Image (cartoon, rainbow, N blue to C red):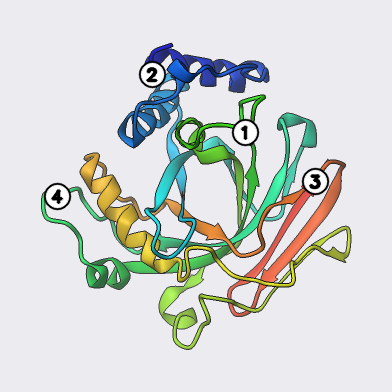
Amino acid sequence: MTESTLAAQLVRAREQHALIEELAAPDIPADAGAAYAIQHEVLRLMKAQIGAWKVGARTPSAPPSGAPIGSTLVHASPARLELASFFRVLIEMEIAFRFERALPARAEPYTRGEVLDALGGVAVTLEVVDSRFAQWPNLAPLAQLADSQNNGALIVGGFEPYNVVAPGFDFLAPRLELTLDGESIVPAAVGNPAGDPRELLVWFVNHCSHMGLAVEPFWTITAGTYTGAHRVEVPGLLRGSIDRIGEIELALV
């Protein structure tokens, strides 16, 4: 299976709601570059526009990774989605950002100061984690990266001005709540495995620039879970909030 064939398989899985039953070793992307190319090939084949991105890292010192999210998979809170429209549902609560202006692709890397100075808004998000592979999660990381880094959908709360929220805000362990049918599903320890999610944005902007993409101010960039991934197997109502940023709601029916 070539990379383009894998892209076609991923498109078929989405359009026909049919899992890819087996992924043999030759089917796995050769490297991260091939996986990122497949992400964009899937969008092209589906005639989808980018509405958001997800970025993350396993630790503050680990290499970040990311994936574009098609605009039809981005939903404003309060959202109502069918549980059966996914292969499986794991919910992650995150903080997302938008830039106040476009950041065009360029040869010179963007500095941390330039990236943070361009931030315009911050919001609460819920990511629906899903996979088009039956083998998931026992699957090569590069295959998961090609599959939109396991994104199923993104629910986005209202944006607050970044320059109002950021001073004094604890980006490492913010005060938050997340409930499923009124019962808390917040783990004992709250924190983003990447540390301060704003550090991921520097990688993200330069990742886009390297691919020749301008970072658009209407993109929502969600930047890693604070609550881990909570499996949801039956319909229910998720409600969450992050202190000083806002609230979010998702009904799975």
Asked which secondary structure carries label 2, the reply is helix
Residue 138 is marked as 1
Q: Is residue 147 above or below residue 230?
A: above
Rendered residue at 40%/67% (across/down): 198
Asked which secondary structure carries label 4, the reply is loop
**Residue that label 4 marks:** 106
Q: Is residue 124 above or below residue 72?
A: below
Cβ–Cβ under 8 Å for marks 4 and 2: no
Residue at the far front in the pictured view: 25
**Among numbered discs 3 and 1, the one appearing first in the sequence:** 1
**Residue that label 3 marks:** 232
Estimate the x, y position of residue 79 in percent, counting from the top left. 71, 49
Q: Hey, what amino acid is under mark 1?
A: Asn
Cβ–Cβ under 8 Å for marks 4 and 1: no
**Among numbered discs 3 and 4, the one appearing first in the sequence:** 4
Point out the frontmost of discs 3 and 1: 1
Estimate the x, y position of residue 5 in percent, counting from the top left. 43, 12
